[in-house]
Amino acid sequence: MMSDYYGYGPDEATLGDRLTAAREAAGYTVEQMAERLGLGVDTIEGWEVDQAAPSDEGLGRIAILLSVSADWLQRGEGAGLVTPDADDLATELVELRRLLQEALQRLTRLEGQVNQ
C-alpha cells in the first residue's frame, strides 16, 4: 500500500512516488533498475523526484520490469503493488533455502578442488 512507503494515500501520490514504491517493492536499487533498463542512474532519480517523466515506451518497459501496470504508474489506476500473502512468502523462502544449499554444496566442492 502506498501509505506504507510515504505516509500519504494513493490519491496524493505522484508518478515518481509510485515509481519509487514499485521499485522498492520489486527489490531493486536505483542502480539495479537503471542497469536493467539500460539507462543512467540520474534518469531514474529524476523520474522518482518528478523532475522528468519516462516516455510512453519507457513507461511500458518499467511497468513490465516492476510488475505493475503503466496506468497505475501514471495515474494510480489499474494493477499496482501487490502485497504477497504468507503462502507466497513461504514458497519463496523454501526455494531460496534450496538454492542456498545448492550454492553451499558447490562452494564446498570447488574449495576442495582448489585446495588439492
Image (cartoon, rainbow, N blue to C red):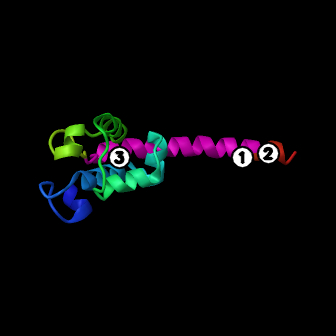
* Residue 49 numbered mark, or none: none
Tag shown at residue 89: 3
User: What kind of residue is marked 1?
Assistant: Thr
Q: Quadrant of the C terminus?
A: top right
Q: Label 3: how many residues lie within 10 Å, few (<14), some (14-19) or many (20+)? A: few
Instruction: Tell me: residue 92, above or below residue 30.
Output: above
Front-most of residues 4 and 8: 8
What secondary structure is marked by label 2?
A: helix
Amino acid type at mark 3: Leu
Looking at the image, which residue is at 19% across and 60% down?
3
Q: Is residue 29 visible?
A: no
Residue 100 on the magenta segment: yes
Q: Which element carries disc 1, helix, strand or loop?
A: helix
Query: Does residue 18 show up?
Result: yes
Q: Quadrant of residue 67?
A: top left
Q: Earlier in the sequence, mark 2 or mark 3?
A: 3
The percent coordinates of residue 44 (x first, y second) are 39, 51
* Quadrant of image for the N terminus: bottom left
For the magenta stretch, what is the residue range?
A: 83-110
Q: Amino acid at mark 2?
A: Gly
Q: Main secondary structure of the magenta part?
A: helix
Task: State the residue at coordinates (30%, 59%).
Answer: 49
Of the pair 49 and 68, the residue shown nearer to us: 49
Label 2, on which residue? 112
Confirm or deny contact between disc 1 and disc 2 (CB under 8 A): yes
Measured as percent of width and height from the top left, residue 53 is found at: 29, 47
Q: Residue furthest bottom?
A: 7
Which residue position holds label 1? 108
> Residue at image x 20%, y 43%?
72
Crowd rating for badge 1 (residues with CA inside 10 Å; few <14, some 14–19, many 20+): few
Q: Earlier in the sequence, mark 3 or mark 1?
A: 3
Residue under the image location 48 percent in, 52 percent down: 31
